[in-house]
Image (cartoon, rainbow, N blue to C red):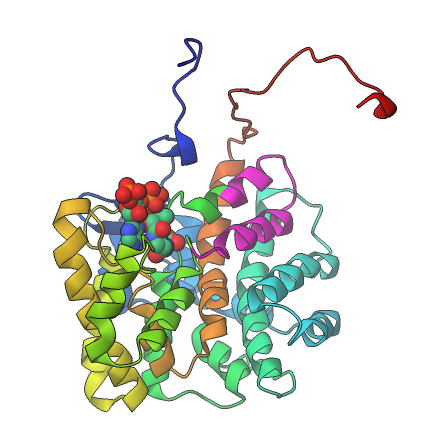
Amino acid sequence: MADAGMPQISRGLEGVYVDESSVGKVDGQEGRLYYRGYPIAQLSDNSDFEETAYLLLNGQLPDRQQLESITKQLAESRDLPKGIVDIIKEMNSKADPMDILRTATSALSAYDTEVQDASPEANMRKSIRIISRMSSIVATIGSVAAGREYVAPDKSLGHVENFLYMLNGARPSKESLDIMRVMFIIHAEHSSNASTFGTLVAGSTLADIYSAITAGISVLKGPLHGGADEASVRMMRAIGKPENTESYIESALAGKQKIMGFGHRVYKTYDPRARIIKEYLIRLQDHSSEEVRTLTAIALRAEKLMVEKLGQSHGIWPNVDFFAGPVYIAAGIPVELFTPIFAASRSSGWCAHMLEYWKNNRLFRPLEYYTGKIDLEYVPIDKR
Ligand code: CMC
């Protein structure tokens, strides 16, 4: 029987506004995304990660001097303490790269003398160190997994170029660098998604920024959120050949399985980030490896079928994670690093939101409607 006292519950906080923000705007009806007012396509066409991170953290594009300053700060923070490299080596092959990233990022707090300084200035400095070092951690996870030693960063390189250098022990090709420049920008921010919200919930208790970012990484890991990029390319590999695509998808849908890389809580139309990555993939196609060409053909067939079946009718369209896999593979990135790279880039959005939220902090403490029993009589263990 319906409970007359039951309040209106919004499961998954669907449709609930938890605060105001000027960091990022997602327009789910029109399929638009803005960072501090700039359309994502303008940034992915023209910007680089340092400039985008500055924009997110400070609210406006930097002038030359400001850009030089953040570039220098990011470059100077890159080197990882030996203890962090040791954690990565110890966990290598025993743990998922997202678990290694979460543990190593949390451990960074031990090496930051400002960890307890909650002033806005110190939090900004810590944000820059976190953004810088999470990329170094992800690169080192990849380098150690490939059997290489820690590659010390090169301060003369840009953020993304240095990431690829630390990952592979060699300077990247122009093509890989451009792919990863776009991917780092596209993943940097996405308003109050689950991981940003998780970051804010931890930070709203006035826990330090390392605790907040570690919470964000934990939340990002799952396949309904950041982990969908890996799940989607694993599906494409399981499909194997382009001609198997339709039967695979049809049978997955008939079995009530979700197709990873499709659907979104906010976008009920094409995710603009998916559009950018898809266009990039199509441009790459002619000069990419056979594997990337096959994955691209599978992805395009799967997209066509899904859009016909669930696009207009159910508002289920490709999201950022669907085309990401083949593009990463074209840049030589191993599948296990897709979600950690998402986290390394998203650290800029998480920090920007955290700094904004702390300007007017309020503890998150929602309610649950209790449906259990009450006033039970305690029964001693030998009488149960
Ligand atoms: N494939 C097939 N059916 C789907 C899909 C999908 N990818 N996504 C949603 N549906 C169906 C779902 O089965 C349900 O159907 P019914 O009403 O018949 O039970 C209906 O659509 C509503 O789904 P929901 O999961 O309740 O909706 P939501 O608002 O919670 O969905 C979502 C958001 C992202 C969790 C979901 O679309 C999903 O699980 N997608 C696959 C995972 C994925 O790609 N995640 C990455 C999201 S974008 C990157 C990021 O920001 O993290």
Q: Is residue 91 visible?
A: yes
The main secondary structure of the magenta stretch is: helix
Tell me, yes or no, whether the highlighted magenta stretch contains residue 202.
yes
Of residue 112 and residue 328, the one placed in the foreground of this image is: 328
Of residue 150 and residue 118, the one placed in the foreground of this image is: 150
In the image, residue 174 above or below residue 72: below
Q: Quadrant of the N terminus?
A: top left
Location of residue 271 in the rendering, given as x and y in whole percent from the top left corner: 24, 55
State the count of labels.
0
Is 276 on the left-hand or right-hand side of 340? left
Location of residue 31 in the rendering, given as x and y in whole percent from the top left corner: 20, 50
Location of residue 262 in the rendering, given as x and y in whole percent from the top left corner: 28, 56
Tell me, yes or no, whether the highlighted magenta stretch contains residue 383.
no
Is 345 on the left-hand or right-hand side of 176? right
Question: Which residue is found at the position 59% from the left and 70% from the top?
Answer: 137
Q: Is residue 190 visible?
A: no
In the image, residue 121 above or below residue 147: above
Location of residue 364 in the rendering, given as x and y in whole percent from the top left corner: 54, 30
Q: Report the magenta residues as a range.
A: 198-223
Of residue 277 and residue 260, the one placed in the foreground of this image is: 260
Q: Quadrant of the C terminus?
A: top right
Question: Which residue is found at the position 69% from the left and 56% from the top?
Answer: 109
Q: Quadrant of residue 143?
A: bottom right
Question: Which residue is found at the position 64% from the left and 76% from the top?
Answer: 93
Q: Quadrant of residue 203?
A: top right
Question: Which residue is found at the position 46% from the left and 89% from the top?
Answer: 171
Of residue 136 and residue 234, the one placed in the foreground of this image is: 234
In the image, residue 57 above or below residue 327: above
